[in-house]
Amino acid sequence: MRFIVCVKQVPDTTEVKIDPETNTLIREGVPSILNPFDQFALEEAIKIKQENDEIVAISMGPPQAKKALLKCLALGADKAILLSDKAFSGADTWATSYTLTQCIRKIGVFNIIFCGLQAIDGDTAQVGPEIAAQLGIPQITYVESIEKLEGKKLEAKVQTDDGYKIVEAKLPALITGITPSSFEPTNPPMMNIMKANKKPFSTWTIGDLGGSIDNYGLNGSLTEVIKVYSPPARQQGVVIKEEKSEAAVQKLIELLSKDKVI
Amino acid sequence: MITVDKEKCTGCGLCEKACPFGAIKIMEKIAVIGDECTLCGACVDQCSLKAISIQRKKLKDVDLSQYQDVWIVAEIKDDKVRNVSFELLGKAIELADELMQNPCVLLIGNNVKKFTQEFSNRGAKTIYIAENEDLKEYHTETYSSVITGIISKYKPNIVLYPATISGRDLAPRVAATLELGLTADCTGLSIKEGLLLQTRPAFGGNIMADIICPITRPQMATVRPNVMEMASIKDNGNAEITEIPVNLDLQSLKVKTKEIISVSSSECGIPVCEADIIVSGGRGVGCQENFKILEDLANVLKGAVGASRAAVDLGWIPKSQQVGQSGTTVSPRIYIACGISGTIQHLVGMKSSDIIIAINKDPEAPIFSVANYGIVGDLCEVVPLLTKALKKKLSEN
């Protein structure tokens, strides 16, 4: 079987800090990382992979996104393809999913496409379903884990509003989700990082993907960001420190009444 | 494409500071734009010299005026209309008024016609009904094909979906099938120069973006529950009703449900994404039994019990109640964090709440940095006292 894992290199938003004076993002020193949710999806693919299966990690991004793909190779992907071209920049979710779809079509036969729950910078969770729609294959979102993989069928445990359900899908299919029990993504051992450099890696440009230039990047985007700004800063709160809990609670109730919260 | 006019640029560095993606560097007194650029336009707004410009594609040659009305896709669960549907309607009425168009509701499911009066009384002008036994359970394939067909036929100007588990599954499927723009998880919607201005948080809530969809119709967005005001009940509405025949073949479904495992959430009250008030517990709660203390407080406030990832991982509370980056993002009116230290992943999921109250032993806990009110103390002591005091206070009101 062939599994394709779509990944993104993102700024580590957990490292982002806000300048309290200007209320703007402090970008300095914010590292670029493999989107943790994509890593979890890749790890699930590795978990179900059998001897003759192949995992291909693909990513659209600037040349430096190679680093994220090298991490995928070190973690256990067999091959990686970076989609990098000036023409791809400024892509919204539609143009991004179009670009990844073109790549998947060029790769050819596949059985399962894995996408992370969402990217930690955009948080949209839209690219996965949009790829599935363009390829005309079924999608399963909010997957917790893959329970069974047999022949052309996959069984997955899926999160619902009030619990879980077990679904059965005919392959090929696209799945998104997978959140493991620990949010801290693991780092591959040094040995594997060295080996990763020897695994097949290619960079494809718009020429490799074909299709009209009007569908890529900013040209192909159907939505347009017209303004980006910092949200209003939260006002400094009141922290109550009292010897006795009774006094603290009483003080809180007084404040809540005064501020008309209750 | 983005270009810097070298004649106009003085290398003042305003754009470098404004760039949320750190893509601009000033080199030899000229702004140089790197590969990290996403063409978001923050720098263009900042540059008083108009040295930076972004060239965008021209309007598609389609008559956009044939697309009329503001639609919402209602979500029905357990034979009840979910509140988020009324929230969407409230917003749709406001947008439709501004555009001088009609607010409309699409009711899709099995046996959903009975809900028409509820929407009509809350101000819907036309209600479209796609009813079929085979729509009883939500399936991406059936719902998206039915909605895709209806949108193509009736040509709405705007379609709003709830940003729930099924809404976030459905909307992108429909959008990509019809080649439409879609904005996820909006927390603000308004009309600007005739277009839908969609506001959403990104970057873990650290930045806000205003987004438009100028060239395709309908303009579509998913909207976070609990952010918009519900449409109020006015009088006996008399919305026009349009029934749409639906033919389905469940045999051909490629994804089938084999089993439904409901996690009893009765002790947690309402789902966290819909709650107006959430009482959340973290590792500091200490043990599963202590969650009872939180439930008592939630009951008095008619709120939901939520949890941090740590508490879910320890098995104290079901995953459906988890608040945070890998759980649910919530924005209730009041969020009470008990024994939650406030990891960045948790803060991202709740810091847009109106009022945050934190109770924690550790005065240095990061949760206090986002809290409007905080108590440094033992939650096992503080929370029961708070429950008692609030119960008294609320009975007086």
Image (cartoon, helix red, strand yellow):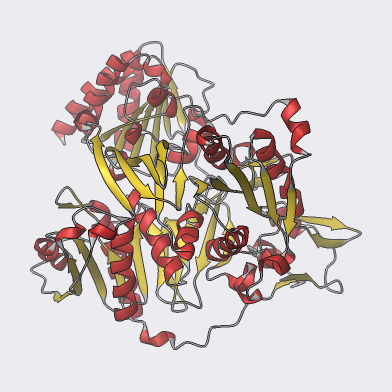
Quadrant containing the C terminus of chain B is: top left
Q: Is residue A134 above or below residue A237?
A: below
Q: Is residue B290 above or below residue A59?
A: above
**Quarter occupied by residue B349:** top left
How many numbered marks have been drawn onto this rendered protein structure?
A: 0
| Residue at point 31%, 17% (across, down) | B288
| Residue at point 27%, 15% (across, down) | B289
Q: Residue A199 at x, y = what percent?
A: 74, 41
Q: Residue B344 at x, y = what percent?
A: 53, 34
Q: Is residue B241 visible?
A: yes
Q: Residue A166 at x, y = what percent?
A: 31, 40
The one nearer the camera, B218 or B89, is B218
| Residue at point 48%, 36% (across, down) | B347
Q: Is residue B123 visible?
A: no
User: Among all residues in the image, which is located at the extreme top?
Assistant: A243
In the image: residue A122, left or right of residue B250: right
In the image: residue B232, left or right of residue B193: left
Q: Residue A228 at x, y = what percent?
A: 59, 59
**Quarter occupied by residue B43:** bottom right
